[in-house]
Image: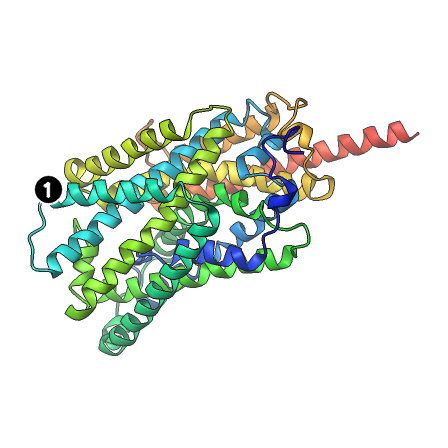
Amino acid sequence: MSQNYPDLIPENERVGQPRQLFWIWFSLNIGIMGLVYGGIIVSYGLNFIQSVIAALLGAASFALIGYLSLPGKLGKAPTFVLSRAPFGSKGNLIPAVLAWICLIGWLSVGNVPTGIFSINAIVTALGFKVTTTTQLIGLIGLAIAVMALSLVKQETLVKAQTIFTYIFGALTVVVLVILVPQTDWSALMEMPNGDWVGGVLPAISIIIAGSALSWAICASDYSCYQSPQSSNRSIFLTTTFASAIPLFVIMFLGILMNATNPGLISSADPIAALALQMPKWMVIPYFITALGGIIPPSVISLRSGRYALEATNIKISDRTSIIFHGAIMVLLPVYVLFINGNFLGSFQMFLGVVGIGLAAWTAIFGVDYVILRKKQGYDPDIISGDKNISVDKGNVMIWFAGVIVGLLFTTNPLFPAPFAKGIFEGNSLGVLLTFAVSLVLSWIYSSMQLKKQTAVREGNAA
């Protein structure tokens, strides 16, 4: 099969079990980025209860990842190979390139700068001064580590993720045990109420944009290695809870830290500011482990980014790919850290704009699976053979419609957003609107396709 359909996973490699997905998704969400998310939630002016609710609902959105893992098992291929079914081979080009931008951008604008902030915290705790030189050395070293690990086998990476998960998870529990008794709970409970519509909803949207929607584009990249005998229910539950539970716990910790020290939100280096609230003996081991915990999701981003790029039929050698992506991993963080200087602002803007295109794609891909592929399966001739539809005009037009709606309601650098006012001002709520509009339009379109295919089959049978 691998000779006729080169994009499909050979049967002898499809031996994975749901428990192996646990370590992949758990390690992706136990990282220190959850602390930053906690700060973002509090920045919307929410009280403690509202912040916890926003974190809980934001983490629960990983049920979407759990469900979008199922097409990988069914179709035996990575996400953006399967995406050729609803979009066509050429129609798939734009969302695949956007997915690549998101994954590499997430790596460069989110993970790597957070890693540098962790290095800064370690340098400071050791009694040294953080300078541009120390940050550049750390940046280059981190990029080299990510590039090197991206070349190891999947089994090796999963083992590394397992180790990081145990160590970082244990230290996180220790921090919670220390921090919770020291928290001024009466002050937390007396925080003024925020706006449920203008505060809680946008806070949830930014978490969904930065977590579930960002990772939806690689949901099937690892489930495609699952054994055909693996239970869909087990795949869904394992992926969902392995993602949501650690993310919520880390965001909860971030809420406690940020709620008791509002200055963390506006800090140019939020990770170093967080370190000030920890016992001195905890800072070095915690942030060394946090730094290690950033590497596995960075490697996953790099690997899945390369999968998305390959789905566009752009073929480059591994060496060229590593050099190219390595340059991006260094240059973009340099801009964020040393030129722009606004990490949280850049991060939220990136999530908001890119999340619009991904939200539209996610809705279309998910609906196509629910209505068409779940019963019919993925035809290998369509996703990896010669019968590929060049452009599915219906789904491509729906994608553009959803993106335009999102950009009209979201402040962005592309063009003025006339409706980015009121509850849509300064947040990613337009991302959820994009998802909703694309979902409804795609549901109508896919239902029409199903009726047409059913009529053709009945006519042929007659």
Q: Is residue 396 above or below residue 33?
A: above
Side (left or right) of 221 relative to 386: left
Side (left or right) of 156 relative to 114: right
Colouring of the image: rainbow
Q: Amino acid at mark 1?
A: Thr
Q: Is residue 111 above or below residue 324?
A: below
Query: How many badges with numbers are in the image?
Result: 1
Q: Name the residue located 34 percent from the left edge and 37 percent from the top edge.
A: 105
**Picture coordinates of residue 308 (x, y %)?**
47, 33
**Picture coordinates of residue 31 (x, y %)?**
34, 56
Q: Is residue 265 visible?
A: no
Q: Give 296 or 33, whichever is nearer the viewer.
A: 296
Q: Name the residue located 48 percent from the left edge and 35 percent from the top edge.
A: 307
- Does dot 1 land on a helix, a strand or a loop? helix
Side (left or right) of 164 relative to 341: right
For mark 1, what is the residue? Answer: 133
Residue 27 position by quadrant: bottom left
